[in-house]
Amino acid sequence: MNTVLAAVLLLVFLLSLLWGRYPQPGFTQISVLRSDALAQSLILNIRLPRAINAVMVGAALAAAGMVLQTVLGNPLVEPGLLGVSQGAAFGAALAILSAGGRFWSISVSATFFGLAGLALSWFLARKIRYGGSILRLVLAGVVVSAFFSAGLGILKYMADPRSELPEITFWLMGGLTSSDWSSVGRTVPPVILTLAVTVLVRWRINLLALDDRSAFALGSNPGRERLMLVVLSVVAVAAVTATAGIISWVGLLVPHAARKLGGADTARSLPLAIMLGAIFVLICDNLARGLLSGEIPLGLLTSLGGAILFALLMTREEKPLKR
Amino acid sequence: MIESANNAVNLNNLTFSWPSTGTPLFRNVNLSFPSGDTVCLIGPNGSGKTTLMELILGWRKSDSGSIALEGVPLSLIPARERGRKMALVPQDERPAFSYSVLDYVLLGRAPYLHPLSPPGKQDRDLAFQVLEQVGIASLAHRPVPRLSGGETRMVLIARALVQQPGIMLLDEPANHLDPANRERVMEILSRLKSSGITLIISSHEPDIVTRLADFVVLLHQGRQPLMGRSDDMLVPDKLSELYGVKVSIIEAENRRIILWGN
C-alpha cells in the first residue's frame, strides 16, 4: 500500500508540473517544454515550488491530525479544535496589520499565536471542573478558538478595507499563490524535521491511544510523550499555516481515510496519512489554480472536497465507538 | 518490615490520602506479597482496592512510605523495566480506534522495544502464542471495539502476558462476565498461578477469585488492611464485619460457597 501511494504521489506531483493555464488551459505538452523558455521558467520557478509547498501542507496537516486524534483518543479532533488554527490566524492577521505582512512576521506571529492557542487550551483544560481529560481539552479548545475568532473579527473590523482586509481574507481562505523558492525554503525545514521525528516514533504513538494508566503500565510516560507529540504537530501546522493560510478539513478527513486503508495502528496508518494528505492537497491546489481563469482559494476547495468525502466516509462506516 | 527480595511486593509504612479532598485512605500500611503467590484484595466498593493497585503500579504516588518490587524501591525502577516486571489488566478498556486484536496485544511489547522500532516477527510470534494460550487466536484480526465483554477481558489479559511480567495486577478480572466466561478467566488465571507469576487480584466478590488465593487482604475503609492465609480470612465473622451483612459459609465439592444475607 505504501509503494502504491508513493507511486501515485509521484505521478500526481509530476503531472502537477505540467498542469496549468500556459500556454493553454490543460497539460503543457512536452514538445512545447523543449522550445518554450517561458514554459520552462514557469515550471521551475512557479509550479515546482508551489507543488512542493502543497505536498508539505498536505503532509503536515494530515500527520498532525493523525497524531492529535490518536494521542487525545478522539477521532474528531483536528488542529482547528485545539485553538491552534484560530490562534495562528489571529497571529497572521495581527502581523498583516502591524508589520506590513512580510512573510517572516506572518510566520513567526502565526506560530507564536498557534502555540499560545494550544497552551491556553491546555492551561484552561486543567482548570475546567467538568468531564474527563479529553473532553476538558476539547471544551477548552472551543473556548480559546472562539476567543481568537473574536479577536480576529476585531482586527478585520480595524483593517483597511482596500489593502489589508483583502489580504487577511485571502489568507483566511488559504492558498498557495505566493509560493516561490524562498517560501519553500521557509516551509520545508520545519515540516520535514517534525515529520521525521513523528514518523520515527510512529508505533509508540499508539500507546497514547490507551488510557493514561494503561500507557503508564506499558512503561510510557503519557504526559510527557503526549506533550512532545502535540508540540511537534503544532510547529508543523503553524509552519504550513504561515505559508498557505488556513487549510481546513485535511487534518480531519485524511487520518480517517488512512485508518480505513491501513488500520488503526499508527505504524502503518501514519505514513499512509502523510502521502494521502499530500496527494489530496496537491490535487485540490491544481484545481485551485487551473480550473478557472482566476484563482480559487485552496481552503475553500479542501473544505468542499473534504466535507463531501468525509460525509461519504462516515455514513459508510459501521461506527464501533460510542463516546 | 524487612525489605526482602523474596517478596514480589513490599509496602512499607504507606500512607495515602485523596489528593482533592485530603481524606485519608491508607495510613502506615505494611504489607508483603510473597513471590509466586496469589493475593486477593477483597473489600466493598470504595474500600480502596483499585487505589491500592494503582499505588503498587506506581501510577499514584503515596504521601509517605515506600513500595518495593522484589526488594528494589519502585521509585528507582526505570519505566521500561517496570513494564517488564509488572503488568496491569484493567477491568475494561474501549479504544477509540478500531485496533485489531493482534495490534492491540502487541502494544504489550512496548517495554521491550526501542522507542523507534515497531514490533518485529518475534514479537508477533509471541503475541500469537499468547492468543492461543488464552484461547482467542481466532479473533486476532477482529477489531477490539466490537468484541464482547468477555473477549475484551481476554485481550487485556493477553496484552499483559506479552509483557512477560513476574507480577500481574488484575482489577476485578471476573466482574460483569457470564458464568462461562468467568470460568475461562479463572482457568487462565489458575494456569498463570501454576506458572509462578505473582498475581494480585482485586475483587468485590470474594466468592469467585478467592478460589485461587493463597493470601487474602481485607480492605476495610478507615481501618488497617488485614492480610492472612485465605483459610483464615474467608470466615463468616470477618466477612460479615467487612461487608456489613450476615454471612455464612458452606462447603460443597471441596469449595467454599459464601451465602450472603439471611
Image (cartoon, coloured by chain):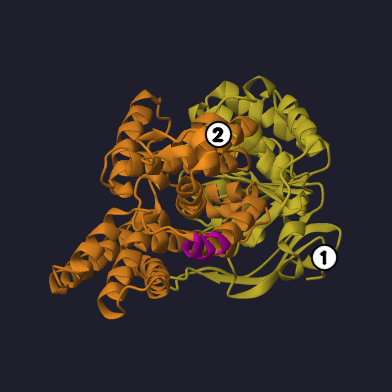
Chain colours: A orange, B yellow
Describe residue B30's horizontal placement relative to residue A122 as left or right. right
Residue assigned mark 2: A11
Describe residue A123's horizontal placement relative to residue A150 as left or right. right
Assess whether residue A184 is covered by the magenta stretch: yes
Residue flagged by tag 1: what amino acid is it? Answer: Gly
**Label 2 marks which chain's residue?**
A
Between A86 and B112, the residue placed more toward the observer is A86
Residue A222 lies in quadrant: bottom right
Say above or below: A119 vs A80.
below
**Label 1 marks which chain's residue?**
B
Residue assigned mark 1: B71
The image position of residue A153, as x and y in percent, is: 17, 66
The answer to whether residue B93 is visible is no
Residue flagged by tag 2: what amino acid is it? Answer: Leu
Assign the magenta stretch its main secondary structure.
helix
The image position of residue A163, as x and y in percent, is: 19, 69
Q: Are marks 1 and 2 in contact (CB under 8 Å)?
A: no
Between B77 and A199, the residue placed more toward the observer is A199
Q: Nearer the viewer, mark 1 or mark 2?
A: 2
Residue at x 60% of width, y 36% of height: A6
Q: Residues within 10 Å of mark 2 (few under 14, many from 20)?
A: few
> Which of the labelled discs sits on residue B145, or is there none?
none
The image position of residue A184, as x and y in percent, is: 51, 60
Say above or below: A291 vs B51.
above
State how far apart marks 1 and 2 are (Cα): 61 Å
Residue at x 26% of width, y 58% of height: A170
Say above or below: A279 vs B14.
above
